Image: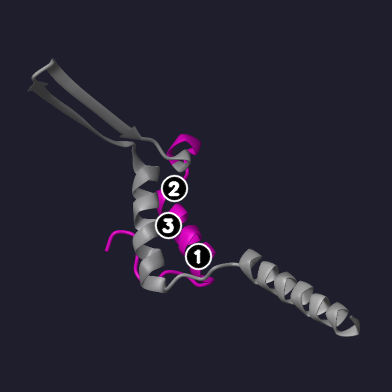
Amino acid sequence: MRGTGRHIGLAVAGVSALAASACGPQRVPLDDAMERCRERARLAESPRGRVGMGVGSDGPITTFDVTIGSDFLAGRDPEQVYIQCVINLTGQRPTEPLGS
């Protein structure tokens, strides 16, 4: 029974270390971050959406899909959204401007 306490202590320490590492910032490769952040910056410029219309066996079919980003609603500058997004994901500034 004496050894059992030691194993439980190690298990708790292992779980604590795993939980702490899961809460830390997850870094993304710079190229991937720039691609993700370009899309977020595009949503800061204007809403994106699509409308589909057609006819099916049950009659007319219409689909409507609009995405409005919170950055657009807040009036944020798309270039600044892009830069800050990349910094948040990677810890470094983008190596390419938004427009490239």
- The numbered disc on residue 89 is 1
User: Which residue in the rendered view is the most extreme toward the front?
Assistant: 1
The residue carrying pointer 3 sits among few (fewer than 14), some (14 to 19) or many (20 or more) residues within 10 Å by Cα, namely many
Q: Residue at x 72, y 76 (%)?
A: 14
Q: Is residue 25 magenta?
A: no
Residue 95 seen in the figure: no
Asked which quadrant contains residue 61, the reply is top left
Picture coordinates of residue 30, whole percent (x, y): 41, 72
Asked which quadrant contains residue 100, the reply is bottom left
Q: Are marks 2 and 3 in contact (CB under 8 Å)?
A: no
Q: Are marks 2 and 1 in contact (CB under 8 Å)?
A: no
In the image, 14 versus 85, the foreground residue is 14
| Callout 1 amino acid | Leu
Of the two numbered discs 3 and 1 on the same chain, state the one appearing first in sequence: 3
User: Which residue in the rendered view is the most extreme toward the right?
Assistant: 2
* Range drawn in magenta: 72-100
Q: Is residue 43 left or right of residue 4?
A: left
Say which residue label 2 marks: 77
Secondary structure beneath label 2: loop
Count of numbered circles in the view: 3
